[in-house]
Amino acid sequence: MTERHWMGVADATRAFAARTLSPVELLQSLLDRIAKLDPVLNVFITLDAEAAMDQARAAEAEIAAGRIRGPLHGVPMGVKDIIDVAGLRTTGHSRVLIDNVATADAVCVARLRQAGAIMLGKVATHEFAIGGPSFDLPWPPARNPWNPDFHPGGSSSGSGSGVAAGLFPAALGTDTGGSVRNPASACGIVGLKPTYGLVSRRGVFPLSYTLDHVGPMTRTVADNALLLDCLAGHDPADPASQPTPRTNYAAQLERGVRGLRIGFVRHFHERDVPASPEVAAGLEHAARVLEAEGAEIRTVTLPSLSEFAAVNRVLLCSEAWAVHAPWLRERPEQYGELSRRRLMPGAFMAAGDYVQAQRRRLQMIAEVEDAFREVDVLFCASSMDTACRIEDPETVARTYSRQARTPFNVTGHPALAMFAGLSKEGLPLSLQFAGRNFGEATLFRVARAWERAAGTASRHPPIG
Amino acid sequence: MDHEMMLGLARAAGLDRALELFPDDVAAAAKQASGNIAGFKAPVDPRAEPWPPMRPGSGAGTSL
């Protein structure tokens, strides 16, 4: 039988329905594990144990009475601390917002609650989703459960570490340049950046308006699809939100990849930013597995990673400067060093630079759309390296840009990063799939085929 | 970007306090900005539009 802390969202709700486990029992097991592991992993900024237990008791009574509120009823979740949860602080992991208490739930949190989820607390991030991992902030950085000496990736670092460590079965993260997919890659879980406009950003502290996405982080592809079912939907108060038809994202999960055309973007990791040999071998292995499962693998060429990254950074820095300029002028000392260095570049960019980046962006979108006329899904690297040592600032800085996630923030296409096996050092390898706009169902189908063939869902960190 | 230009832009942006307290961070930010701007090919076709485009009537449903 699966240990309670490794139960996924769907496992837990099935056990609740079968009366073999109650929400209170699950939550108590997770709180015991948090008490044991969080002093090492630094996942939580605010643990709301009492309120979570009240919600678990209520869920237990409702489920016993046959009143199921939704597909997440009674399941605890972690929330990145730039996302509002009513009554709790949204600190952004920063001294700047240390006393900022949210008065309402973000729309994404409200939607999870509507489906019955329990908000367990607020979890670590890089400061304002950009400045980290840092040791000069009010809370320490989260650590990687595969080896706490290593970085869990960021900026949704607490979400990734907590899900991988079995502190909660799912979490919310945000992704502006790869911040859901980076910790998913480093911690060996599943992280989705949905299509731009599919999930409301209202109630999420902005980093960059035209690049920000909210996404689910889970240990299995099926759980990720389940969360997206609850999160997706038009929000008229989010100007980027798109009206989309109701979709059952899990409907195609078990259909396999036979007949699908998968475009392998090899130049990302072979030429643009050469990956470590283990990462490159892992990608080739995954391509062979998907081909053996019946997919047709084609090589696809897109603009270079360095150009995607430059466009991403001009947009991100310009928009982030618009958000942070007043505080950076008045109280720069309240930010960590990495945040200051990553937020101030916008002060040195001209309006024309920003417009040129947006114009180049439209061309890049067109180039990726062209690729999707020839293939159904794109396949490429996520991180070019496994996680690095967290207390080695030079390696952290060197590996920071060695990734292939920013292209899909620039273009808005959905992208999912997940576990691809273990390195010789015992750290997760990763891969990434990207889909057509609002094509998450196909993306999950391919990801599930890989997960099933490779058996990745049953691998957990040797901790606790 | 030379040092004088960096100082001028930083002051024009109101970063006097940051210049006083964290001059290395301001210089690093300026260097990063230059690299990013030079890192992509600006479209030469005048008809190349930016994304996202202006969309009439697509504003937020609530005013902030």
Image (cartoon, coloured by chain):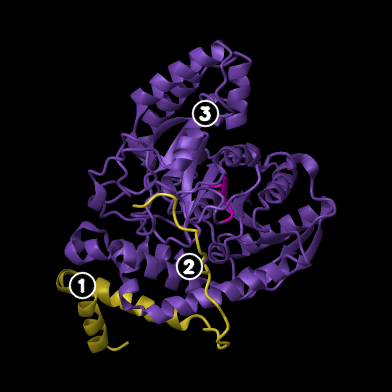
Chain colours: A purple, B yellow
Residue at horizontal 22%, vertical 79%? B12
* SS at circle 1: loop
CA–CA distance in space, label 3 to label 1: 48 Å
Magenta stretch encompasses residue A214: no
> Where does residue A142 sit, x and y in percent of width and height?
38, 46
User: Horizontally, is A206 left or right of A288 in the view?
Assistant: left
Q: Residues within 10 Å of mark 2 (few under 14, many from 20)?
A: some
Choose mark 3 or mark 1, whichever is in front: 1
Residue topped by disc 3: A5
Choose mark 2 or mark 1, whichever is in front: 1
Find the residue positioned furthest to the top.
A65
- Does residue A93 lie above or below A303 as drawn? above
* SS at circle 2: loop
User: Horizontally, is A178 left or right of A32 in the view?
Assistant: right
Residue topped by disc 2: A401
Magenta stretch encompasses residue A192: yes
The reply to whether residue A423 is visible in this rendering is no
Residue topped by disc 1: B15
Q: Amino acid at mark 1?
A: Leu
> Where does residue A13 sit, x and y in percent of width and height?
59, 24
The one nearer the camera, A316 or A265, is: A316
CA–CA distance in space, label 3 to label 2: 33 Å
